[in-house]
């Protein structure tokens, strides 16, 4: 696979992980679309309730540090692409956060930063919470869920 293919594949995996994390953490949605058709193709995930867009999400991952100006541009583009969404989020996934991007994410509640090294633990926690909340803990054991996540995360190659 070419470098572009690896980067694209990793991006789709992270979109799927974020979609899973976002929908497991809430109960107000009835439909999810990953890579929805939008005017500007700046939204990666949309959650719906009764046909209305609850949440529009842009996911960016990089082995390099994000610039504050780029993060602002990504969030603005997603907001412009989903003007009817109740909420719009930008997820930044990397291990190289600059002080300016940390400060921006701290002051901008619609920006969520997830270091690569913590993403798996966050996902496991949300999935376990969901299984308990849905009453599925007898059918799906925590060890099976952790095995699923280890397999999924093993497919995410973080080349620099």
Image (cartoon, helix red, strand yellow):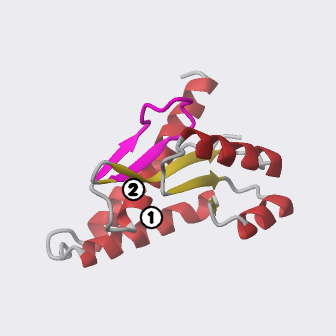
Does the rendering let one see residue 124? Answer: yes
Could you say which is closer to the camera, residue 134 or residue 75?
A: 75
Which element is circle 1 on?
helix
The residue at 35%/67% (across/down) is 127
Q: Which residues are magenta?
A: 31-48
> Residue 107: which quarter of the image?
bottom right
Q: Which residue is mark 1?
A: 123
Could you say which is closer to the camera, residue 31 or residue 147?
A: 31
Instruction: Residue lying at the far front in this picture: please name it.
Output: 84
Q: Which residue is mark 2?
A: 20
The residue at 42%/72% (across/down) is 125
Residue 10 lies, in percent from the top left, at 53, 39
Query: Is mark 1 in CB contact (under 8 Å) with mark 2?
Result: yes
Q: Residues within 10 Å of mark 2 (few under 14, many from 20)?
A: some
Looking at the image, residue 145 lies above or below residue 133: above
Residue 11 lies, in percent from the top left, at 54, 39
């Amino acid at each position: 696979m070419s470098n572009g293919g690896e980067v694209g594949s990793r991006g789709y995996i992270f979109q799927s992980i974020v979609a899973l994390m976002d929908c497991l953490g809430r109960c107000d949605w009835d439909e999810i679309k990953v890579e929805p058709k939008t005017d500007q193709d700046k939204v990666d995930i949309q959650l719906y309730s009764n046909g209305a867009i609850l949440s529009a999400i842009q996911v960016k991952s990089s082995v390099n540090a994000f610039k504050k100006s780029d993060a602002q541009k990504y969030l603005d583009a997603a907001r412009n692409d989903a003007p009817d969404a109740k909420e719009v989020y930008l997820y930044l996934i990397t291990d190289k956060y600059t002080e300016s991007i940390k400060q921006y994410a701290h002051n901008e509640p619609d920006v969520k930063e997830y270091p690569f090294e913590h993403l798996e633990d966050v996902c496991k926690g949300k999935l376990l919470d969901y299984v308990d909340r849905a009453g599925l803990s007898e059918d799906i054991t925590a060890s099976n869920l952790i095995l699923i996540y280890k397999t999924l995360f093993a497919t995410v190659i973080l080349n620099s």
